[in-house]
Image (cartoon, rainbow, N blue to C red):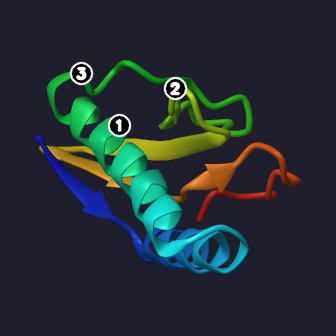
């Protein structure tokens, strides 16, 4: 399986980098992105580690909470791809849709 970052997830990553660079430092921001990337890579070997999203009526979306962070990766498994839809900060209001 390979990881595919969908456009919203890429935008979320840029926002996380910008936020932590502004409120802390570039090294703190980089560490956050490393944690997120490592967790995403874990999905390659364990794609069903996440739980079914309660917000998805079709049960196609899984959610993987990144340990030691406030972030969750909602994702779908399509053929041989793990499509990461967002990098969601659980401290914020959940969107109506992951896409």
- Above or below residue 85? Residue 62 is above
- Above or below residue 74? Residue 66 is above
Residue 22: give x, y in percent of width and height. Answer: 67, 80
Q: Secondary structure at mark 3?
A: loop
Residue for badge 2:
67
**Residue drawn where x is 58% and y is 76% of the image:** 21
Left or right of residue 5, residue 99 in this image: right
**Residue drawn where x is 63% and y is 31% of the image:** 53
Left or right of residue 61, residue 22 in this image: right
Quadrant location, the C terminus: bottom right
Residue 78: give x, y in percent of width and height. Answer: 26, 46
**Mark 1 crowd level (few <14, some 14–19, many ≥20, 10 Å Cα):** some
Q: Secondary structure at mark 1?
A: helix
**Mark 3 crowd level (few <14, some 14–19, many ≥20, 10 Å Cα):** few
**Residue drawn where x is 66% and y is 74% of the image:** 19
Q: Secondary structure at mark 2?
A: loop
* Label 1–label 3 contact, CB within 8 A: no
Residue 17: give x, y in percent of width and height. Answer: 52, 73
Q: CA distance from mark 2 to mark 1?
A: 8 Å
Q: Nearer the viewer, mark 1 or mark 3?
A: 1
Q: Which of these two is toward me, 62 or 92?
A: 92
Residue for badge 1:
39
- Above or below residue 69? Residue 50 is above
Residue for badge 3:
46
Left or right of residue 40, residue 27 in this image: right
Which label's residue is closer to the chain start, 2 or 1?
1
Q: Which of these two is toward me, 75 or 38?
A: 38
Q: Which of these two is toward me, 25 or 46?
A: 25
Q: Which of these two is toward me, 99 or 33?
A: 33
Quadrant location, the N terminus: top left
**Residue drawn where x is 76% and y is 43% of the image:** 90
Q: Nearer the viewer, mark 2 or mark 3?
A: 2
């Amino acid at each position: 399986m390979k990881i595919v970052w969908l456009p919203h997830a890429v935008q979320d990553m840029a926002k996380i980098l910008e936020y932590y660079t502004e409120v802390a430092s570039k090294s703190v921001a980089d560490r956050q992105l490393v944690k997120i990337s490592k967790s995403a890579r874990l999905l390659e070997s364990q794609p069903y580690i996440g739980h079914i999203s309660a917000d998805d009526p079709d049960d196609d979306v899984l959610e993987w909470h990144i340990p030691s962070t406030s972030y969750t990766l909602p994702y779908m498994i399509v053929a041989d791809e793990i499509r990461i839809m967002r990098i969601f900060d659980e401290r914020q209001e959940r969107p109506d849709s992951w896409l």
